[in-house]
Image: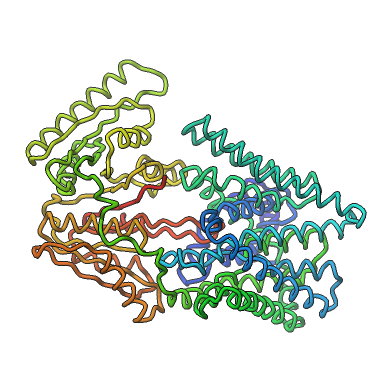
Amino acid sequence: MEQFPAWIAANPIASFTILLLASLTVPPLFERIRLPGLVGLLIAGVVLGPYGLQLLDPKTETIKLLSDIGKIYLMFVAGLEIDMQAFRKTRDRSLSFGLATFLAPLIVGTLLGRTFGFGWNASILIGSLFASHTLLAYPLVQRLGVVRNEAITVTVGATIFTDIGALMVLAVCVSIHQGEFSWYSLPLQLGSLALYATTVLFGLDWLGREYFRRTGEEEGNQFLFILLALFLAAVGAQMIHIENIVGAFLAGLAVNDVIGRGAVKEKVEFVGGVLFIPFFFVAMGLLINIPVFTQTLLSELVFVVTVVAGLIGSKFLAAVVTKALYRYSWVETLTMWSLSLPQVAATLAAALVGLQVGLLSEGVFNSVIVLMLVTSVLGPVLTQHFASQLPFSESNSVETADSTYRHDAEERSILVPVYNPITEPYLIEMAALLAYNQSEKIVPLAIAQAPAHFDEFQLTEMIQRSRKLLKQAAEISSGLGIAANPVLRIDNDVALGICYAAREQDARLILMGYGDMTTLQARLLGNVVDQVFKTSHCPVAVAQLRASPSSLKRILVVVWDLLAPGVQLVTLAQHLATANAGSLTVLHICPPPTSAAKRQEFRQQLRQSLVPQPSTTTSKLKVISHLDAAAAILRMSQSFDLVMLTDARSHAVAGLTPDDLTLPLVQKLACSTILFSIASV
């Protein structure tokens, strides 16, 4: 029996199975108690490692390989998550804040290292660990609806400078430690580094655009191309004696614009978020020597506290300097400070490299773990507090008139893809209610999917079935007194066929039936609804109708922010409420603690976005503060016939903080639902 743990640790398949089990079960448990899932993964590594159950051994080739891939993937996704558009808008200020929040922690960390007896090389590396930051609290800022506030965009843009700078310092420090650095070779090394960075940033960007242009919508091959680009950049970095995480981060920046926000990016992030990145954090936990960690906290408590205080103080100093330069308010300054506090992605990856090459001691590594734990909890808490007090910038507001949605509506159409004859009548009826006037046509669309290997009999069957669906749609439309223009399309890709037809018919809205988006296959490979969301040129409404649309009198609209999707959804809901002579309640849920003044400000902004309604329609605005948004919506939905909400799925920031709020809601709601997504292209 004593040999069983050793057998598990030495068996690659068994180790991989345990890693999968930990990645699946541990993060949700910790998120339930309001702790980051990555903290749970670290603790899982400790429990499963040499100082716990001894089921995983960090020295085995399996763990080393998966940990290295996870480390590379972590930095790659960090590069992908940089909002390049926000950076371009505030480039100068982002670079200024980036320089300040890089240099101040670098200097403080270096002085701290020297004070505690470390050499110059190790001290500078410790300083570089302070210099980067991870946007762990960005999903909270999104929920608060202030992502376009300049303080937020400047902090997001600064991440490019801090992460690249910290990784470059790491590369130089490791080269010096390994004896590969000299002042004579400095120009050559810097030149090769500059040439390498330029090749990756511009070369991969050009290659990616060309490849994506030539392959069209072959998402599988595009996904493989992105993975190849990642590992080519990582291997290239190693060839010029630079850490592979530098190449991974540059590769993420290089392909950022290429893949945009489409399905390929979601696949890349999904694979990293559920597999390799969790494996990395578990492997980090395996390296934590419990006796040494405990001794570090007891005998080197002053050093640990100084490390945490030095990071917090230096980040605050950088924010204050930026405040003086650009006259930001204290609320904006404190938001920038708190948003730049968490030390996770680049910090942990660089600390692991420093430990592996012998440049950092276990005591420093353990102190970095404590730093990560403190800042990953403190940063989001402070960001939520300060960002909730930010004023809405003018760029956050959307025109009160629904001109962007109703523009030339009388000349446009509503596209209704039909597939299920049972749900088809409700979809056509809903489209009739959403039509602005009787001159606006409904376009029922049936896709006859061509077999991958041409089969005349199968194709004929699909065409006959599609014609029956279109005939039924025409009859339903005629009975409702609205014009219909049925379209039959033969295509081997249903999602692309819908999107192409929407362009051809100049559709202002695609109205679809709901498909299951929660299965592993749907999340990994995407389904038709998911792909239409990402490639449509116009807004998409996905309806799960449990009753006749004309009976949906009490409508609840959930608005996450005042950006275009939320306001357009309110406009859509107002029109439906008017058509049904019903009532409309617009709900916004703020994360606590949000002041009453802030809630009132949001309420006023929301009221300005509403268009005047007939006296037959009643509208209410509710802005509440609640810790669990999903629970609040589920409770309120019991009094309504229809719940309408935007697709609020936000990607993980560096694959660390998945925030899937919408999909579980759609599954749990007992009433009819409409999920709305604005065009992403």
Q: Left or right of 37: which side holds 534? A: left
Residue 125: image location, x then y, percent: 78, 66
Can you say whether 510 is above or below 475 in the image? below
* Image quadrant in which you'd find residue 580: bottom left
Residue nearest the observer in this picture, 619 or 615: 615
Q: Left or right of 182: which side holds 550? A: left
Q: Quadrant of the C terminus?
A: top left
Which residue does the image show at 83% across and 62% down from the upper left? 358
* Image quadrant in which you'd find residue 101: bottom right
Q: Left or right of 615: which side holds 253? A: right
Residue 329: image location, x then y, percent: 51, 78
Q: Is residue 383 visible?
A: yes
Residue lying at the far top in this picture: please name it: 456
Which residue does the image show at 27% across and 19% down from the upper left? 460
Which residue does the image show at 12% across and 43% down from the upper left? 438
Q: Is residue 47 visible?
A: no
Residue nearest the observer in this picture, 223 or 110: 110
